[in-house]
Amino acid sequence: MSGIRIFACPFTPHLTDVEGNALRMVEELRAAREKNCDLVIFPETALTGYCLGDLHTDPELVRRQERVIEEVLAPACLHIAAVIGATCELRDGDDALVARHNSAVVLAGGRVIHRAYKVLLANEGVLEDSRYFDAGPADRLSPVDVPLAGGRTLRLGVLICQDLWDDGESVHPARQLTEMGARLLCVINASPFHLRKPDLRRTVAANRVAECGVPLVYVNATSLEDVGKNLVLFDGHCFAMSAAGLVQTRPWDGRSVVWDVPLDPVSGPFPAPQVRPEALLAEALIYGIREFFQKSRGAPNAVIGLSGGIDSAVDALLVTRALGADRLTCVNLPTRFNSPLTRDLAGRIAANLGVNYRIHPIEDVITAHAARFAESLGRPVKTLTLENIQARERGNILMAYAQELGAMVVGNGNKTEFQRGYATLYGDLIGALMPLGDVHKLLVYALGRELDPHGEILPPEVFTVVPSAELSENQNVLEGRGDPFDYHIEAPLGVELIENRATPAALRQAFEARSLDSSLWIPDAQGRTVYDKMTPETFEDAARDVREAIARSFFKRVQSPPNIVVSPRAFGLDLHETLLGG
């Protein structure tokens, strides 16, 4: 047999809707037969979805999967073969649980012909395989002979997600399967997205192909799921590596594809076109916002506080792209500290977007609060207290608009602010969703330019005005005074410490060697680099200060809305922190 026709299905599971998912799979199987395909590949945990929490351990959920496999899916595979991700349990004669496996079920000829169990469990970030599943025994790894039309047989090696990532492991599933005669490696996945992930997947897959010498097909789920604090994206990225080269789908497309995959020996390389991170980020966040509003039990519309600054401007643009202008209300909530410039910018952005726009001044309310506190305390309130009163009053009003309009508040905080704790509890930390909560400040600017490359929505001043909360005279943007730190230092330091897991000492060494990542450590608007602004001593001190600020401010993040994970390490359950650990 020289080749095989694959139907790669980046399936979107409806969480725990086993029966409904099975019926939609039958439709995909029917479409594959019409295209004369040999093998249909569905993702990992396709029958249930991946992020189920402890529902993975519900015996009834597992029994429902077994029923639809035997009664619905197997009969649909009478004239076609399929690989389907499911949960399988092994029980003894007394019906006591022996093992629960993250599994791939292989169907052909109207019956189950093989079950593959995930050997290498994923236990990093939002993934907790070991909490729910037992590792498959390495000595049970074996390929399966899949009968195909025309009397052909394919010896297939099935891997489940982490089984592909065997560098540094004592077990090498891909190599073991090919040593036993597998002519094609099929990898089913529920692989969470982040900006570096598509390249990482291709690199790891290419390494396995080079080691094993056989073609490989990779199929991922398309979905937004959650682990409570984090919204987890599965981007539906699918690809095949063979003697014909690399073919792949676009993330977020979600449509099944047909590939004719030759079974000739292969080694690579497999060059891939590069996608700008900003473009990938924009697609990810728009998809995530749209899915969140479709799947959540909240209201269908959105409310945003629109200040005229970059964060709220980008959030408004993202939500408009995801939901439509008619479903977004933007509210400007000025006090005497908000400049005519930013007030004007907010109105122009709202008009350009075509969203519902309201101006709701709060100066009188803030003045009344300050007077009442002064009366009670016998002195004026502190500046910081007055700043926080403004933020909380804005939050209060936005929540009221949301309730009146049948909407959910979308928060505007970014990851750099969260690492510093530069946000007010019960103020700007409110909302059902924080789309930019895993996007650092400099990337927010890049995202704005990506979303509006011709400046049709975002006026140029949005990118040039000094970033400022505008909560006091000390943050007067017309005088060039804004937030109390340099984002060209603060944002990259956060990425280095959180996502790259660097230490202040290691960062100092990189600074001294002038080997910091130039794509991250970009010059500021005046063209000054970090090397122009700092010495090795002040740079290391700044890194230690940011690391301490991260630890101090966790009590705020633990009470913040969920974020959409787009980086290798997001605040929430992706980055495990403690309130008392320091």
Image (tube, rainbow, N blue to C red):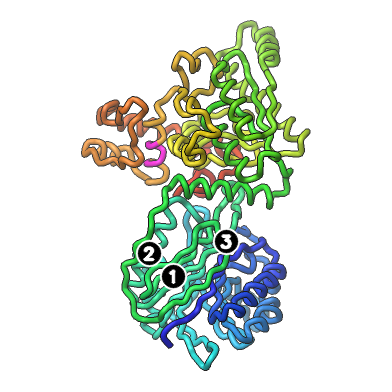
Q: Residues within 10 Å of mark 1 (few under 14, many from 20)?
A: many
Q: Quadrant of residue 485?
A: top left
Instruction: Name the residue carrying label 3.
Output: 254
Instruction: Name the residue carrying label 2.
Output: 204
Mark 2 vs mark 1: which is more N-terminal?
2
Q: Residue at the location (44% across, 17% down)?
A: 480
| Mark 2, secondary structure of its residue | helix
Residue type, numbered disc 3:
Gly
Q: Which residues are magenta?
A: 492-496
Classified by dominant secondary structure, the portion drawn in magenta counts as helix
For this rendering, which residue is in front, 79 or 155? 79
In this view, the residue farthest toward the left is: 513
For this rendering, which residue is in front, 97 or 501? 501
Tell me if I can see residue 415 in this picture.
Answer: no
> Residue 232: percent from the left, percent from the top?
56, 53
| Mark 3, secondary structure of its residue | loop
Q: Given contact means CB atoms under 8 Å apart, are the residues at marks 2 and 1 in contact? A: no
Alpha carbons under labels 2 and 3: distance apart: 23 Å
Q: Residue at the location (56% across, 18% down)?
A: 471
Instruction: Name the residue carrying label 1.
Output: 240
